[in-house]
Image (spheres, rainbow, N blue to C red):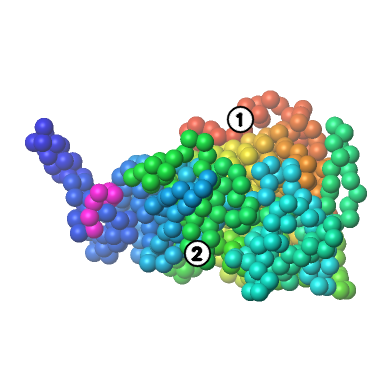
């Protein structure tokens, strides 16, 4: 039998081109990368491919394929893909997985029992103790200890003292427990507890500095920088002093902003919850029924925490872009995002957080806006598990993005002709897919973004045939697909479900002024079961001028009705918001014609949308087997969408 196997491997090695490089968890980076002697790391495999191209080896004529065998590849830093790793249209670089998982996670071992809890020491990563915001047990995300199991039971704020940056909340059992935890001598908690605050279309993560109970209310203050940002920025604002609302079913709703508290051992009171004490370097877990110490201490290492924010970075420059690289069949898992822990997180919209945001008095009157500009904001961008910038013709096909702490994949800027197709996005804290600029951090975000060097714009991106489900499950104001300033981008045949806010965002800037957006197409997507937690939302939402843009033949259905939404009626199937201009919205199926056109600019066309649309639209929307991606590429520059094959 051994001789037969050796013969098979020998024949495979002889038939394989030298441009086929093999990687296996059981390999060695001192091997030569053949099928019989695979490498161990993708980093070295990329280097070997790079050398083949550098030396003009004849084997690269038909391309270089890095075969990644089944198994988990734990990273200690992101996998960097640089211009030297580029292929050509006739000789691409393909990184192909066969059940391969690229992981930024660390196993938690050495669990022991402490009362009803399991406790383990904080794991090390690269020689350092780490902090983290997620814990996964047997591949399922555990719940970071919080004061409510059901979000319908969240408390609601009472009032705000903006000049003194104080928020008043009711005295709940959790608030009492946290006040008792406050150390009057040291003037600090063991570590900051977070308030996650519902604000119209976003949630803010605010690290609590102090709680003082005063009668039937408690005064809460927060750490910097988020305290100043939270109390100075006007949009989105917390809802206060709102009148109770009686819903059609007779339920009386409290419309003041809801909140929950998280990140304290005092809140660790239900199976499936966990708490990390960064000062004592202990991780506590309340086991679910049937979970035992022997299970958590098994060799399969079922307890995982994420250590890296980014797993893969494909990054070139405008002058020397990365190009002609394709990832296929790879799973990307276990990333985190630590800014909410270190600096808080106060978003403006779509998860883009504010470094600074404040009111303008008097307002600025501008001819490119239907409304006066009443605030300014300067934004940052959440981390992503996979980041692409300064790159052309980079594709991700048939991959899985799961167990991620912020965005799944992000095409930031300076990309052209890229493809995101046939992937699965699930269990992601933020947006599934992000693309395009949301204003550079030094550029006031309400100004129309129209860079002189158009190479910086994300252009010709195809997002097609992806299944996006259960994303946005921590940062509720994020999206299934979130596109800012993009041009000639096609979003087609995706299925988006179980999202907290809107399904698809297209556009940025809140202005009618001509900018770099144009020629985008959103068609034949199936969006359902959205708005699990937020309102002021839609299945498809647009902003600003984007001439020759078409939204056609989509199906939007089944919206959630959370009891803590800031305005129970403020949800829509299709929503063109401030400055939306030059957009055709046509032949979209929705159960009713519940749409909003808010402060739109000129040249919009709405035609034949609603429940009377032809049944063929419902039949053709969503994921399509054998979708012709090459055909989508060919139609990128067309002015009006044609039917997909």
Evaluate if marks 2 and 1 touch, with contact meaning CB atoms under 8 Å apart. Answer: no
Seen in the picture, residue 30 relative to 183 is either above or below; the reply is above
What residue do we see at 38% from left, 46% from top?
297
Instruction: Evaluate whether residue 170 shows in this view.
Output: yes
Q: Is residue 309 left or right of residue 205?
A: left
Q: Which residues are magenta?
A: 23-29
Look at the image and tell me in which quarter the N terminus lies. top left
Marks 2 and 1, the one that precedes in the sequence: 2
Q: Is residue 300 left or right of residue 535?
A: left
Q: Residue 16 appears in which quarter of the rendering?
A: top left
Residue 383, magenta (yes or no): no
Seen in the picture, residue 127 relative to 200 is either above or below; the reply is below
Seen in the picture, residue 341 relative to 522 is either above or below; the reply is below
Q: Which mark is residue 280?
A: 2
Residue closest to the eye, 364 or 175: 175
Disc 2: CA contacts within 10 A as few (<14), some (14-19) or many (>=20)? few
Q: Which mark is residue 485?
A: none
Q: Which residue is mark 1?
A: 620
Seen in the picture, residue 453 relative to 249 is either above or below; the reply is below
What residue do we see at 21% from left, 46% from top?
35
Type of secondary structure dominating the magenta stretch:
loop
Q: Nearer the viewer, mark 2 or mark 1?
A: 2
What residue do we see at 84% from left, 57% from top?
216
Give SS at disc 2. loop
Disc 1: CA contacts within 10 A as few (<14), some (14-19) or many (>=20)? some
- Residue 600 placement (x, y as % from top left): 81, 53
Residue 25, magenta (yes or no): yes
Tally of marks: 2
- Residue 137 placement (x, y as % from top left): 47, 44
């Amino acid at each position: 039998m051994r001789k037969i196997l050796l013969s098979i491997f020998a024949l495979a090695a002889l038939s394989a081109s030298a441009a086929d490089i093999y990687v296996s968890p059981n390999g060695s980076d001192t091997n030569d990368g053949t099928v019989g002697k695979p490498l161990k790391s993708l980093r070295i495999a990329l280097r070997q491919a790079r050398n083949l191209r550098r030396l003009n080896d004849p084997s690269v004529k038909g391309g270089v394929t890095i075969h990644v065998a089944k198994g988990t590849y734990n990273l200690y830093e992101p996998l960097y893909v640089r211009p030297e790793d580029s292929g050509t249209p006739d000789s691409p670089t393909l990184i192909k997985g066969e059940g391969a998982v690229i992981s930024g996670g660390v196993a938690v071992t050495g669990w022991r029992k402490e009362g009803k809890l399991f406790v383990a020491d904080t794991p090390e990563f690269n020689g350092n103790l780490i902090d983290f915001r997620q814990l996964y047990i047997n591949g399922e995300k555990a719940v970071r200890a919080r004061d409510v199991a059901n979000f319908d039971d969240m408390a609601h704020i009472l009032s705000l003292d903006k000049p003194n940056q104080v928020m008043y909340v009711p005295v709940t059992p959790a608030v009492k427990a946290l006040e008792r935890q406050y150390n009057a001598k040291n003037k600090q908690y063991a570590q900051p507890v977070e308030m996650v605050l519902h604000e119209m279309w976003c949630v803010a993560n605010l690290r609590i500095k102090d709680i003082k109970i005063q009668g039937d209310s408690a005064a809460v203050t927060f750490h910097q920088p988020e305290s100043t940002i939270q109390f100075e920025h006007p949009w989105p604002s917390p809802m206060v002093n709102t009148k109770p609302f009686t819903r059609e079913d007779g339920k009386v709703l409290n419309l003041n902003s809801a909140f929950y508290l998280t990140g304290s051992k005092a809140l660790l009171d239900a199976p499936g919850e966990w708490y990390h004490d960064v000062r004592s370097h202990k991780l506590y877990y309340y086991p679910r029924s049937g979970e035992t110490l022997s299970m958590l201490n098994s060799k399969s290492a079922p307890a995982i925490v994420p250590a890296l924010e980014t797993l893969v970075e494909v990054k070139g420059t405008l002058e020397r872009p990365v190009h002609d690289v394709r990832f296929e069949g790879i799973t990307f898992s276990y990333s985190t995002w630590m800014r909410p822990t270190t600096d808080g997180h106060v978003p403006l919209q779509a998860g883009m957080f504010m470094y600074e945001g404040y009111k303008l008095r008097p307002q600025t009157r501008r001819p490119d806006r239907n409304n006066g500009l009443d605030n300014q904001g300067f934004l940052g961008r959440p981390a992503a598990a996979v980041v692409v910038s300064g790159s052309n013709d980079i594709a991700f096909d048939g991959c899985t993005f799961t167990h991620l702490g912020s965005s799944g994949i992000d095409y930031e800027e300076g990309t052209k002709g890229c493809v995101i197709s046939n992937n699965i996005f699930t269990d992601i804290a933020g947006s599934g897919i992000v693309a395009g600029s949301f204003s550079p951090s030094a550029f006031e975000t309400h100004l129309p973004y129209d860079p002189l060097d158009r190479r910086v714009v994300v252009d010709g991106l195809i997002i097609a045939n992806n299944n996006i489900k259960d994303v946005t499950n921590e940062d509720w104001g994020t999206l299934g697909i979130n596109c800012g300033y993009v041009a000639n981008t096609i979003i087609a045949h995706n299925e988006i479900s179980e999202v907290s806010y809107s399904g698809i965002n297209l556009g940025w800037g809140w202005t009618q002024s001509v900018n770099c957006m144009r020629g985008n197409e959103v068609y034949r997507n199936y969006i359902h079961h959205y708005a699990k937690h937020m309102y002021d939302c839609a299945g498809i939402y647009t902003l600003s001028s984007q001439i020759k843009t078409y939204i056609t033949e989509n199906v939007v259905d089944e919206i959630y009705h959370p009891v803590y939404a800031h305005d129970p009626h403020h949800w829509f199937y299709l929503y063109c918001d401030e400055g939306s201009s030059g957009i055709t919205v046509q032949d979209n199926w929705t159960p009713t014609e519940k749409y909003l056109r808010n402060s739109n600019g000129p040249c919009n066309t709405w035609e034949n949308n609603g429940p009377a649309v032809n049944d063929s639209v419902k039949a053709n929307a969503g994921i399509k087997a054998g979708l012709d991606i090459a055909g989508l590429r060919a139609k990128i520059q067309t002015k009006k969408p044609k039917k997909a094959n």
